[in-house]
Image (cartoon, rainbow, N blue to C red):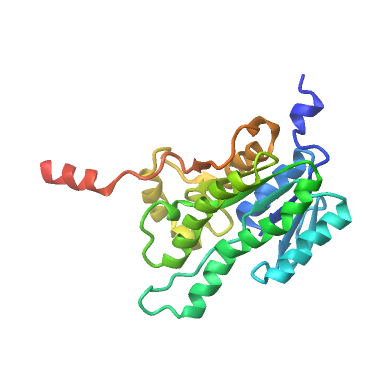
């Protein structure tokens, strides 16, 4: 029989999930709620179909003052803050040679500065609660060339360095980790990865031979914020199906065939 503690490992904790109204963020928020946490999600506008178990607060996290007001408001309303999932992010494609400085600033503000500002705002509340856990949602773009999304890749790489440093500055009370996300199916799969044929070709080049599921990122996030990960901090957990096969292997195979 499964006891209550194992079924709800973060019971009575209060968690923020940025960008938690859709996609990976929504999967994480729902999973944390199922595990016993009170979960607050934010976005610039409220979705039409948010589950009743989640609390929504409108916030543009690129604005440092708005981000702090949001975090402080959550802690005041719910009495504490234990978990922060910095999930919100993304970027349209843009050539580095012609992208405007304003474009790069907005991409980096969303994907790197917002997680830093939110983490700083959460720090005092987590200390007051006796500790906490922060998880930054990074990307395989942080680890490999990402032509067309250069500023995004740089920001996601910065998240990995941010987590390693904060783990030392704020430990042991506050643990800070990252998830390096691979190719994941969401409601935007076709827009992101192309039609079924394109998705199949991408999947064939991944160790697991398939795209990942948002629920699998959610399980990783739950692990990192739970007592099961009490000795895990400053880490970057790859949830990418084993990564991509290096193209040069296929090139050599063709040449030698």
Left or right of 152? Residue 233 is right
Can you give x and y, in whole percent of width and height, for residue 28 in the image?
Answer: 66, 47
| x and y, in percent, of residue 220 in the image | 60, 40
Would residue 149 be visible to someone looking at this image?
no
Side of 225 where 160 appears, left or right? left
Going 76% across and 23% down the picture, which residue do you hit?
A: 2
Along the line of sight, which residue is nearer the eye, 39 or 118?
A: 118
Which quarter of the image is occupied by the N terminus?
A: top right
Residue at left offset 62%, top offset 55%: 87
User: Which residue sits furthest left?
Assistant: 256
| Outermost front residue | 169
Question: Which quadrant of the structure image shows residue 68?
Answer: bottom right
Does residue 228 appear in the picture of this structure?
yes
Q: How many marks?
A: 0
Q: Nearer the viewer, residue 98 or 108?
A: 108
> Relative to the observer, which residue lies in front, 5 or 170?
170
State the residue at coordinates (63%, 39%). 224
Relative image position of residue 216 (x, y in whole percent): 58, 41
User: Residue 228 falls in which quadrant of the image?
Assistant: top right
Q: Residue at x 79, y 23 (%)?
A: 3
Which one is nearer the viewer's eye here, 121 or 5?
A: 121
The picture places residue 18, in percent across and down from the top left corner, at 68, 58
80 sits left or right of 168 in the view: right
């Amino acid at each position: 029989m499964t006891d209550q503690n194992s079924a709800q490992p973060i019971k009575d904790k209060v968690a923020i999930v940025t960008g938690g109204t859709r996609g990976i963020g929504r999967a994480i928020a729902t999973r944390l709620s199922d595990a016993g946490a009170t979960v607050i999600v934010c976005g610039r506008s409220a979705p039409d179909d948010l589950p009743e178990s989640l609390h929504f607060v409108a916030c543009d996290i690129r604005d440092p003052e708005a981000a702090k007001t949001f975090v402080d408001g959550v802690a005041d309303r719910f009495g504490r803050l234990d978990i922060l999932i910095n999930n919100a992010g993304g970027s349209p494609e843009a050539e580095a040679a012609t992208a405007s400085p304003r474009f790069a600033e907005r991409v980096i503000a969303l994907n790197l500065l917002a997680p830093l500002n939110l983490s700083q705002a959460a720090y005092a509340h987590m200390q007051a609660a006796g500790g906490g856990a922060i998880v930054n949602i990074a990307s395989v773009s942080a680890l490999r060339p990402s032509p067309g999304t250069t500023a995004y890749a740089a920001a996601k790489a910065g998240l990995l360095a941010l987590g390693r440093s904060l783990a030392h500055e704020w430990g042991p009370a506050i643990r800070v980790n990252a998830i390096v996300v691979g190719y994941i199916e969401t409601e935007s799969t076709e827009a992101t990865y192309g039609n079924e044929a394109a998705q199949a070709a991408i999947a064939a080049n991944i160790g697991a031979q398939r795209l990942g599921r948002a629920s699998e990122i959610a399980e990783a996030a739950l692990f990192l914020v739970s007592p099961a990960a009490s000795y895990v901090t400053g880490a970057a957990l790859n949830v990418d199906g084993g990564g991509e096969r290096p193209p040069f292997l296929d090139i050599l195979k063709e040449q030698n065939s």
